[in-house]
Image (cartoon, grey):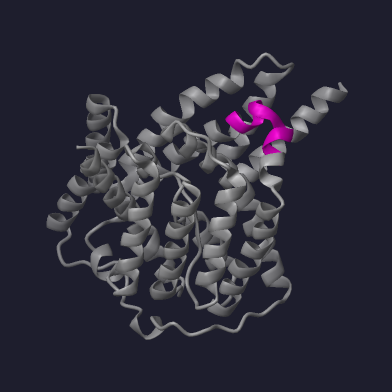
Amino acid sequence: MEILKDLLAAISGVLNALPQGLLALTFGFASVPTAIAFVIGAFGNAVTSNVAVISYQAETITLAGTLGKNLRERISMIFFGALIMLIIGLFGLLERIIDWIGPVITNGMMAGVGIMLAKVAWDMAKNDRLVGISSFASALIVYVATNDLVYTITISVILSSIIYFFVKKGEQEIKDNAPKEKLVLQKLILNPMVIRGALAMVCLNIGANIAFGKINGDIASTEVNVDTITIISSLADMGSALFGGGPVEVVISATASAPHAVWAGVIMMLLMAIILFVKLLPKIGKYVPSASIVGFLFVLGAIVTLPDNAAAALTAESGGATWIAGVTMVVTAISDPFLGMLAGVIMQFLLGIF
């Protein structure tokens, strides 16, 4: 039974990644080179026993895709941003940041991410109401009945995808990107726009790696070293970008709730690598609408992540904890974890003065 749950969790992680993978293709990122990133991630997690998987992340894909004028600029942003993050991880700076900012800001960031996930789910559901409602309803019912994230994402994604298939049969969200699906070493460039984009991705990933890494650790009931996952995701990004692939970052995954979280994550990343290597992403992706994951995102944000972290942040005994936590949560929810962390630090500093 535990092995079955591990496999279900891995498949659920793949289903969660497919819509973001399709988004990456729309910005011109090739899928075959991105498989390199998933192989690096699988190897890294297996060696380090890390439960936090790397996968397609909509935020970084959108950031690189919109800031870069062409594919060459986009992959250069990803590569140099990952290189900076690799240095940060190798020197153990993220764990030092966590120790420095303290538990109030850390928990506030995680609670803010919970609000953010719920808001993203709601917005996605509004764009595809039938799929969104079916995903919402099934996810809530399954989670309340089982208290299990693996069953929640599996059933809600499959059920809403079946509904999508029969209602919008024959529709395809993107065109095949076959001409770009070759492992060709790309030439990187360095200009002001690339530098700006790389630094923006660093800021986004510092906050996301801390918040997402700790959330995965909480789900798996284990300690997660944020610097370790930063090193793994940075190497994966660099390997992908060198050949024209898209960014892959630390994500909150149902594999963290599997009985054997490490190996469920490894299997998930290897499955994604196979799908990308054999160019199945566009074919499979048209049957899995992006709105199929809204139920899982809502449950993960509003029920699993927000309550405990918000309570821990707001009830801390340190002076001004409620103010610091409130500012951190709200800014994280309306922007990103890095700005939320920065706002919390500023609030903490001001309270220390006055």
Residue 191 is situated, as x and y percent measured from the top left of the image, at 72, 76
What's the magenta bit mostly, secondary-structure-wise?
helix
Residue 227 is situated, as x and y percent measured from the top left of the image, at 62, 48
The residue that appears at 43% across and 66% down in the rendered structure is: 24
Q: Which contiguous range is marked in magenta?
A: 97-107
Residue 236 is situated, as x and y percent measured from the top left of the image, at 52, 64
The residue that appears at 38% across and 53% down in the rendered structure is: 266
- Specify whether 84 is left or right of 187: right
Magenta highlight on residue 327:
no
- Specify whether 90 is left or right of 168: right
Q: Is residue 336 visible?
A: no
Q: Is residue 114 visible?
A: yes
- Specify whether 165 is left or right of 95: left
* Image quarter hosting the C terminus: top right
Residue 78 is situated, as x and y percent measured from the top left of the image, at 59, 67
Residue lying at the far front in this picture: please name it.
47
The residue that appears at 62% across and 80% down in the rendered structure is: 188
Front residue of this view, candidates 291 and 304 = 304
Front residue of this view, candidates 108 and 184 = 184
Magenta highlight on residue 105:
yes
- Specify whether 25 is left or right of 319: left
Res 349 quadrant in image: top right
For the image, the number of numbered tags is 0
